[in-house]
Image (cartoon, helix red, strand yellow):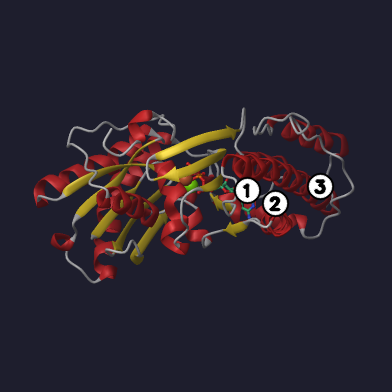
Amino acid sequence: AIILGIETSCDETAAAVVMRDESGHGTIRSNVIRSQLDEHAAFGGVVPELAARAHVEWLDHIIAQAIDEAGIALEDVDAIAATAGPGLIGGVLVGLTTAKALAASLGKRLIAVNHLEGHALTARLTDGVAFPYLMLLVSGGHSQFVLVRGVGDYERWGGTIDDALGEAFDKVAKLLSLGPPGGPAVEQAAKMGDPRRFKFPRPLLREERLDFSFSGLKTAVRLQAEALAPLTDQDVADIAASFQDTVAAIVETRSRQALDRFSRAFPGQEMRLVVAGGVAANRRIAAALENLCREAGAQLVVPPIVLCTDNGAMVAWAGAERLALGAESDLDVAARPRWPLDTPDMKVGA
Ligand code: ATP
Ligand code: MG
Ligand code: FE
């Protein structure tokens, strides 16, 4: 089947064409992304109203480009998949409404996709990973462990109780007058820094639960930055490096615990850890996870970074996986600002 995927839940306007063959093998025919970084830069964060307007302005062009680059005509698609949540509701409405209009006018199937399911299933498009596997989603809006048992079949094993990890990177970047974008800027600064100069707290780490907390760490970084002000370039680099090493250690420890739980839940089953979300781009964190998975004998899958951050291909692919199981959405399907992966209505056929 040929699927058009539309993603507008945050600050990327994205559309892609993905093919899925009978055997379940996927091919990306096009993957067009327009980031709104410049529009929001002056405001220090994503402004929902501006985001929605930019999606309205750009989505038609991005879809046309995706169809064009795929070398097909709009009529050739079998279904149109769009993110229906979770996310900024104005943006979600733009994408979902566009998908409904296309589906209705072309007489094609509509598939409402949960954005998190898009992230969760990407590793099957890129690496054909088999169920079950563990997903660590670390992005600007989410930080969570999810057991992926099948399409639509998820169990949340823990997550952040305050800030997302990408958000923590972005806030630390701001404190240090780096970026935007914050994450890559902190990583760059950390290269020149001494990761042992500061000892930052590792909240919750002694507890057994698979949760994260990054807001206390961020506060510790702020207090350290204030104590040293005015900061030299070396101070900035040392704080960035110390912060980055601390979160790498937190993520590694938590992932080890999550893999332990996986091996207890599926004795004898190969352990698989799939990473998704923009923070997967961080080399220090990726190295910690590579190290962990080597030690634990687990398979580590990190899709190419353009497929880890928000994109249309993951939405098209999730739509393709659902379509293959006979799923289809009604034209009156609702856009949802909140939509956890482990709600019963995620089940195919629910
Ligand atoms: P969500 O997908 O949860 O709605 P989002 O669109 O903000 O949120 P992504 O596009 O997946 O998330 O990722 C962006 C986040 O990843 C930002 O918070 C950014 O700082 C972080 N990030 C990107 N590159 C790096 C890096 N090299 N190191 C650390 N963090 C990074
Ligand atoms: Mg984004
Ligand atoms: Fe995302």
In the rendered structure, find residue 242 and report the number of the disc placed on it. Answer: 3
Q: Residues within 10 Å of mark 3 (few under 14, many from 20)?
A: many
Q: Residues within 10 Å of mark 2 (few under 14, many from 20)?
A: many
Residue 67 on image: x %, y %: 24, 64
Q: Is mark 1 within 8 Å of ligand 1?
A: yes
Of labels 3 and 2, the one closer to you? 3
How many angstroms separate mark 1 from mark 2 (CA)? 6 Å
The reply to whether discs 1 and 2 touch (Cβ–Cβ < 8 Å) is yes
Residue found at the very far bottom of the displayed protein: 71
Q: Secondary structure at mark 2?
A: helix
How many angstroms separate mark 3 from mark 2 (CA)? 11 Å
The quadrant where residue 302 appears: bottom right
Could you tell me the amino acid type at mark 2?
A: Val
Q: Residue at x 68, y 31 (%)?
A: 213
For mark 1, what is the residue?
182
Of labels 1 and 3, the one closer to you? 3
Tell me if I can see residue 138 in this picture. no
Q: Is mark 2 within 8 Å of ligand 1?
A: yes
